[in-house]
Image: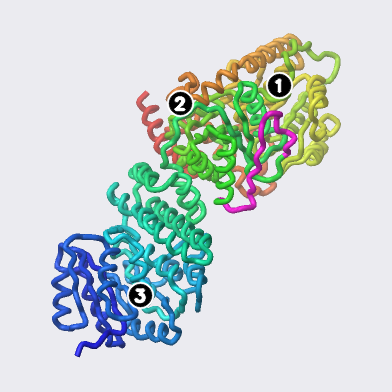
Amino acid sequence: MDTIPLVSIVIPVYNDEDVIAGALDSCLRQTLSAIEVIVVDDASSDGTTDVVQQYAERDPRVHIIRQEQNMSAYQARGVGIRAARSAYLLFLDGDDELADNAAEVALSKAKSTNADLVQFGVEVVGRDGSTGGGFELRLQPRIGSLRGADVLRGLFPIDEPAQGQLWRFLFRTQLLVDAYALMPDDLVLPRVNDLPITFLATALATSYESLPERLYRYHFGRGGSGQKVHDLEWAKFYAGAIHSINTIAPAVQVIANRSSDPAFVHATYDSARLSIVAYTTYYLAEHTGEDLLAETFAHLYTCAPAREIVHATAKFRPGALEKLAAHTSRIDLSERPARSILLTTNVLQRGGVTGVLLSQARLLLAAGFRVTIAAREAGSDESLVPRGAVFVQIDDSTSLADQLAQWADACREHSVDLVIDHHWLYANRWPAFALAARAEGAATIGWAHNFAGRSVLLGITRLAFQTRNMGALSQLIVLSPTDVAFWKLRGMPRVAYLPNPPSPLLAEASRVTAPRKAPTGRPLELVWWGRLEQRTKRVSELVQVAAELRRLGVDFRLRIIGPDWNEMTAAQLNELADRLAIGDLVQAVGPLYGEDLLAAIDSSDIFLNTSIIEGYPLTIPEAQSRGLPVAMYEMPWLALAEGNDGIVTAPQRDATGLAAEIAAIAADPQLYRRLSAASVSAAQRELSHDFATLYQQLVSGTLPASHSPEPTIDDAKRLIDLTILFAEESAKARKPPERRRDRDKSPRRAAESVDQSLSSRVVQKATPAARTVLDIAPWLRPAALRLRHALLRR
């Protein structure tokens, strides 16, 4: 007599000849003998059916159903469900196994609690046979018992990654029959073919129980999980997961219509759907070779709207955003006329990056563009926003996903065509924001505010990150031809240099003053203004230069103007001056603004600058516009220093040399007059730029080629020399303090290594300096070797 089984085990198989025996053996070892095993062969082309047939001949509980055409595991499971005779059903994949007591334990729990669903634990077996790990932990039941709508709420919590593996549950068979009845009969789901039915069954269920026992043995990597994406067809297969979750939308609508809370059903489905979109993006990002990612992501964007892909990934898989941004096609500036421009930085404050951004905003407004200014961190001074511009604050206390949603809202609300990011060089979040802007149809331009070698000097490891993500930018704007060479050598072809717009102080001068008369019969008045920033502006060197001037017998006074900053304050500078016995000659006075600052500049004779690295120091043209000669340490990449005869220089850290240059100016009235006149001419040149035309060319992608010169061997030589200098300075900053008897405070010692020739450094590349460079900047190794070979051939 044929006994009706208590549990049906449905196994969809396709070309599982090598593993199906293990799955069947685990079924036939069940401590509950009243089972049936329904194997649905999805048109295998190997010997799978022969193996199953042999088992069926030995044990009548094993049944095989053959499909003539491969229709996916989704269809195979549906066939098995409709053939099942028992009231409860388990699923088993052909490459996995059940624990010996799986059917008995799960069925006992279902009957004792009258549960529609019983979840049990899972053991995950890696390719090397190991078990455990994060994936296994995530598969374990988290909730003991659920009733009514809480079943869906508990198994598919909103805003959490969706998990829908059918083989984690014992189902009431009728639940699955009802779920399949809501779907098209001929539906084929090659990828993620289980979650759609799990979701529908969960939405239909009214009771749920769980067991801690690990009753399923899952072999990770045997099937489609964890596989590499070798070609575009594989990419399309994995991207099919989005199609799979999309197919149940009509069924979800039916269930929602029957529900007392249809909004909750839809919200849960929307969350699960976005989770699958995010997982698909993550999987493709992690398992696809770099050479195939652009093509893979291009296909991904045909499977879901760009906005959904970006925001789903930010919410559920933010780690995948970087690769998505780096390999997503950019918006060509010439393809979309820009009328509305968003300027962004971290926070609006006086001076620095903000000063450039605000000047740019005024110029763009005057040229007829709509301008929005966005700050991505709290603490902005909104009073600085120019009239006519709109200010947007991104709430940085929220998650990255929420920040990107705010960003997208701002782009849509203000019809933004183009984003100019003034903070991209200093942050790791910018690719995500560029990606979110692109999803709204807006291109992103990165605007650099410092020389590229800054990262080497400061020991910042962000430079490789920025290079990897250059693809997210439609254009990169830098401040000098040397910067153009650097980024082009790093693989960024869309880079050009532009001058910074004039600062308010410079712009409001309306006209450049006449050359100054030489100071005679009184002390020479030196001035410096800016942030008291030590690492790059080296403000303590101002005091060292002053000490050397005192030693040379120069009659002078030095006024240092600016707000305290991080590791340096006005009080510390005054204390240093006192220790060097020049406190009566040097005074750090704190910040001055507006007319007070202008009066201080106009009462001075020379602008002194000791920065080691700057991109486009606006203080130089500001000083020169008032007729002040400039005395500074060498920064040979500065575009505004090229052909600027109002500047005298000394090597970096050579306080004695810089003091000697200033002493020579003080002693020669004619030299002072010539330098002052040259400063005025240089300032006139800086004010003569046609920014309206330059910006129109920039936003339309029509900047002349002269703004983007191709790198030369001399550019490479200069870059390597500068990198060595910055690497040595960085190494000094990291070096522990020496014992007192070994110290040498002479400025000459600090500058000894600066004037070594490039050829000797590269050819003799085993020097400690060269090794330091390659340790800090390994990306220079290929360029260094090519340059060495070129030099040896000369």
Q: Are there few (<14), some (14-19), or many (20+) residues within 10 Å of tag 1?
A: many
Whole-Å distance between the Cαs marked 2 and 1? 32 Å
* Amino acid tagged 1: Leu
Q: Which mark is residue 182?
A: none
Q: Is residue 324 magenta?
A: no
Image quadrant for the C terminus? top left
Q: Which residue is mark 3?
A: 174
492 or 242, nearer to the observer:
242
The image quadrant of residue 193 is: bottom left
**What secondary structure is marked by label 2?**
helix
Q: Is residue 389 magenta?
A: yes
6 or 134, nearer to the observer:
6
Q: Of circles 2 and 3, which is in front? A: 3
Question: Does residue 191 appear in the picture of this structure?
Answer: yes
Q: Which residue is mark 2?
A: 334
Left-right relation of 512 to 556: left
* Amino acid tagged 2: Ser
Whole-Å distance between the Cαs marked 2 and 3? 59 Å
Residue 481 horizontal/vertical position (percent): 51, 24
* 146 shown above or below 720: below
Left-right relation of 535 to 80: right
Residue 148 horizontal/vertical position (percent): 50, 73
Q: Of circles 2 and 1, which is in front? A: 2
Q: Which residue is mark 1?
A: 506
Which residue is depicted at the point 29% across and 65% down? 222
Q: Earlier in the sequence, mark 1 or mark 3?
A: 3
| Snapshot colouring | rainbow
The image quadrant of residue 55 is: bottom left
Which residue is depicted at the point 33% across and 77% down? 89
Q: Earlier in the sequence, mark 2 or mark 1?
A: 2
Residue 754 horizontal/vertical position (percent): 57, 31
